[in-house]
Amino acid sequence: MTIDELEHLLAQQPVSLLHRLARGRIHRHFRAGKRRLIELLLQHSSQNLAGLESDLQTLLAERQSHLRPSRPPTRRREQTTTTHPKRPASTTSGEESEAGGSAVSLTTWLEGIGVPPPQPFVPDPWQIEALAALAEGDVVVSVPTGSGKTYVAIEAARRAMEDNRTVIYTSPLKALSNTKFTEFSRLFGPEKVGILTGDRQENGQAPLLIMTTEILRNLLYDAASGEIDVRLDTLGLVILDESQYLADPERGVVWEETIIFCPSQARLLLLSASIGNPQDIADWLSSIRTTTCRLIRHTKRTVPLRAGYLHPNGKLVPLFKTVGIPYGHPNQLHPEARRLFTLYEEETMPSGRPRR
Ligand SMILES: Nc1ncnc2c1ncn2[C@@H]1O[C@H](COP(=O)(O)OP(=O)(O)OP(=O)(O)O)[C@@H](O)[C@H]1O
Ligand SMILES: [Mg+2]
């Protein structure tokens, strides 16, 4: 097959199949649109087009076998003689059923979203456990997004400062550092909080310092080469927020070195969204630090996820047939989302071939 023929064949495939083809070939392929994905696939396999073609044929064969009717012919004949009226292919309300079950409506999908009525704050058991564990040693917290990791950071910082210890809080992004600076200044008072990022240095001698992890790593580098920063002398607590970045292929090394160079008298608190191997990380910390590290983990989402699809034309629909996100059930796309996907493909690739 020539490169043009292969490109043409790729252009005829749904984008989901192209993503399967891109797995292991293209880094962060899920960010690419169809046209870009085809370009990247052809670019990546320019030395081995036959390999790409062969994988494509395998996926096509697999899809073909799934498309084959599984019902016996007699059942199909019964269906053709049925007197039930035919259902429309899909509706905008999304209440109609597709082969395999009914789909949630947009109203139901949106239900319950908003600001809840105020309630007294009661810490969750895992938050109390994490703070208690920090009194004994280092702590890795691995809980889903939106669980309340900031509360643990704030309480731990408050306790360390009451003990006249310095606290460093790091985040992977300047924007997040800025947000935390505003939030913590409001909470503890502006004189207690400083910020050190590439763009901003304010109140650098404050007992609670917010910085990007790169800045802390550099401070620790300097200390390792003899330039001890006075702030590190009294350091009692280092909070590494979003520490799932440890696994980042490019920036992970910064978190790794920060942990390795962190002064032994300071407690380490790693806050991360759910990760696959948090126990390995806790064990690693225990092995390289003078104190043991406890893992605090839970996987239940406090704030359930809902997935929606916003078409460039402004139309919002549920992405799946259910309010929640179905795991391990293929073909759960909402019929309306499916229709809009197809529409999008038709609109962006009218001739079935990617535009150059
Ligand atoms: N025990 C609690 N009870 C009720 N609400 C809580 C509790 N703890 C935290 N929250 C609220 O939960 C929301 C999310 O908290 P937070 O931003 O700390 O989550 P997170 O775990 O850091 O999430 P992310 O992974 O996105 O950084 C906040 O509005 C916070 O006030
Ligand atoms: Mg957070």
Image (cartoon, rainbow, N blue to C red):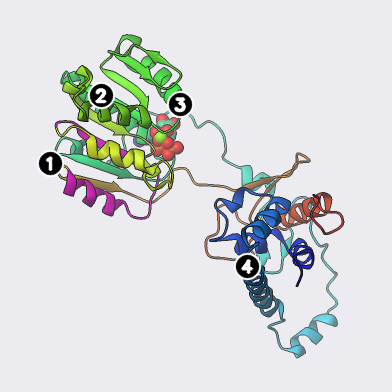
Q: Residue at x 41, y 41 (%)?
A: 251
Q: Which residues are magenta?
A: 265-288
Q: Nearer the viewer, mark 2 or mark 3?
A: 3
Provide the residue designation for mark 1.
290
Residue type at tag 2: Val
Work out whether 37 lies above or below 153.
below
Could one spot residue 181 in this view of the protein? yes
In screen coordinates, is 330 left or right of 227?
A: right
Residue type at tag 3: Lys
Mark 1 or mark 3: whose residue is earlier in sequence: 3
Secondary structure under badge 2?
Answer: strand
Quadrant for ligand 1?
Answer: top left
Provide the residue designation for mark 2.
167
Mark 2 or mark 3: whose residue is earlier in sequence: 2
Q: Position of residue 333 (x, y in %)?
A: 66, 59
Q: Nearer the viewer, mark 2 or mark 1?
A: 1
Residue type at tag 4: Asn
Cα separation between marks 1 and 3? 31 Å
Q: Are marks 3 and 4 in contact (CB under 8 Å)?
A: no
Mark 3 or mark 4: whose residue is earlier in sequence: 4
Cα separation between marks 4 and 2? 53 Å
Mark 2 or mark 1: whose residue is earlier in sequence: 2
Provide the residue designation for mark 3.
174
Could one spot residue 152 in this view of the protein? no
Mark 4 or mark 2: whose residue is earlier in sequence: 4
Secondary structure under badge 3?
Answer: helix
Q: Is mark 4 within 8 Å of ligand 1?
A: no
- Specify whether residue 284 is painted magenta: yes
Mark 1 neighbour class, 10 Å CA radius: few under 14, some 14 to 19, many 20 or more: few
Q: Nearer the viewer, mark 3 or mark 4?
A: 4
